């Protein structure tokens, strides 16, 4: 990662869990621009080093460059014919500096009512999106210094899979497919429901557009407006679901998941569009911010371990059938097992939290660990020592992610 990396994150972070985590921002808009100093501190403390923002004439290039130079932050830059020509985009990249940029992404949700209402999108919004994708892709590939810059596809609205097929001619002009895999009714991240599961989005939107291509989830997350049943989840449930979502996506091979979004867009608790943030609009953290911050502090530089039995020769067993586990190793060589039950933590029809009882999960097998410690990022940042028995380790696991560090 170019620039000064955050403490504890190696310079070569590609492929780590931390490298798979990003968040959407709107740095040129309120409330992001109301208190830049506090916003910057929240970003620094969060451990998130990938931001997604749209290229607009109002962008403060100096702020973007400073975030990269001081925090190692890089930007997934969304471009649109509605806000910049290809020549303007290239000039912006030169002014910003390519080390600040992780990828260029095509038109955001071109099938939205806003974009389709623009004169430039008439009479065929798909042709406008495809032509622009081709033009900026060719411009990037024509220059030696931008030839290797990853190009993401245009995106479509999460519940409009047929529109992915309409954009298929743009598949030749992208390296990675951008998906917006939101759940539709506040389901758990591991759901198998249609219009909600990662598998559904991969089949109906990735494979319908560019089969088998690499994927980034450039928008995903949970809204905290719960006044209408089914429209969102509580802050408590979001704090439980988001770490699971990021780990689940990472395990499934999603290159990067950009949560929507870092800060609430407003103060109306009944307006869903204003309540997606990890922070409130005054920069006060929600429980999800602290959960993500602690998760990245523990796992930011860790990678999935290859090999049989998750690389540990150790197996976790639970009375519940929905136990999830990911075996990782950090750059200090420590082995960490992430565990959780893929339980539903939110009752959408009744707009209320669900208390999930912890179950004893047994960790045993060949190569029994001689020492272990446990952390639950939702609760705090403390690692608590565990004493293995003759048969292994037993840990209580509910719906929150449990991290087990093994020696």
Image: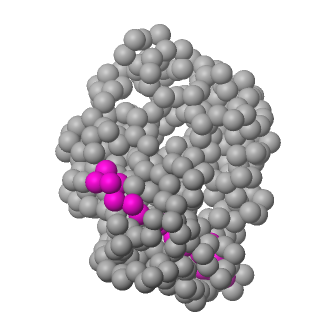
In depth, the one of 384 and 399 nearer the eye is 384
- Horizontally, is 67 left or right of 280 in the view? left
Residue 205, quarter of picture: top right
Position above or below: 237 against 11: below
- In percent of width and height, residue 199 lies at 71, 52
Position above or below: 255 against 44: above
> What residue lies at 54% left-to-right and 79% top-to-bottom?
362
Q: Give the magenta-colored segment's residue range.
A: 330-347
> What residue lies at 29% left-to-right and 27% top-to-bottom?
97
In depth, the one of 152 and 312 nearer the eye is 312
Residue 156: say if magenta: no
Quadrant holding the C terminus:
bottom left
Residue 281 in view: no
In depth, the one of 139 and 356 nearer the eye is 356
- In percent of width and height, residue 271 lies at 55, 69
> What residue lies at 63% left-to-right and 58% top-to-bottom?
182
> What residue lies at 43% left-to-right and 84% top-to-bottom?
389
Residue 129, quarter of picture: top right
- In percent of width and height, residue 94 lies at 32, 22
- In percent of width and height, residue 42 lies at 28, 61
Position above or below: 68 against 22: above
């Amino acid at each position: 990662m170019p620039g000064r990396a955050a403490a504890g994150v190696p310079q070569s972070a590609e492929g780590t869990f931390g490298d798979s985590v990003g968040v959407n921002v709107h740095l040129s808009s309120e409330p992001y621009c109301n208190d830049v100093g506090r916003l910057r501190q929240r970003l620094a403390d969060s451990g998130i080093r990938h931001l997604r923002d749209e290229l607009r004439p109002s962008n403060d290039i100096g702020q973007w460059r400073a975030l990269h130079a001081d925090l190692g932050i890089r930007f997934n830059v969304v471009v649109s014919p509605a806000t910049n020509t290809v020549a303007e985009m290239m000039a912006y990249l030169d002014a910003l500096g390519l080390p600040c940029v992780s990828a260029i992404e095509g038109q955001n949700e071109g099938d939205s009512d806003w974009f389709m209402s623009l004169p430039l999108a008439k009479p065929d919004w798909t042709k406008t999106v495809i032509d622009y994708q081709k033009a900026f892709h060719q411009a990037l590939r024509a220059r030696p210094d931008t030839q290797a810059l990853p190009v993401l596809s245009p995106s479509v609205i999460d519940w409009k899979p047929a529109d992915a097929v309409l954009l298929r001619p743009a598949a030749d002009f992208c390296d990675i497919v951008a998906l917006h895999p939101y759940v539709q009714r506040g389901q758990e991240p591991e759901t198998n429901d249609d219009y909600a599961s990662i598998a559904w989005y991969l089949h109906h939107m990735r494979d319908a557009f560019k089969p088998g291509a690499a994927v980034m989830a450039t928008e995903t997350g949970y809204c905290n407006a719960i006044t209408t049943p089914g429209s969102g989840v509580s802050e408590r449930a979001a704090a439980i679901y988001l770490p699971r979502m990021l780990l689940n996506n990472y395990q499934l091979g999603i290159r990067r998941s950009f949560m929507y979004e870092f800060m609430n867009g407003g103060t109306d608790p009944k307006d869903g569009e204003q309540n997606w943030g990890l922070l409130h609009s005054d920069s006060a953290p929600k429980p999800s911010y602290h959960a993500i911050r602690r998760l990245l502090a523990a796992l930011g530089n860790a990678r999935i371990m290859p090999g049989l039995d998750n690389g540990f020769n150790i197996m976790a067993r639970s009375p519940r059938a929905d136990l999830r586990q990911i075996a990782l190793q950090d750059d200090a060589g420590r082995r960490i097992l992430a565990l959780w039950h893929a339980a539903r933590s939110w009752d959408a029809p009744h707009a209320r939290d669900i208390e999930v009882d912890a179950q004893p999960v047994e960790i045993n097998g060949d190569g029994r660990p001689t020492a272990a410690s446990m952390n639950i990022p939702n609760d705090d940042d403390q690692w608590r020592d565990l004493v293995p028995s003759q048969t292994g380790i037993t840990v209580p696991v509910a719906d929150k992610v449990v991290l087990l560090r093994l020696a």
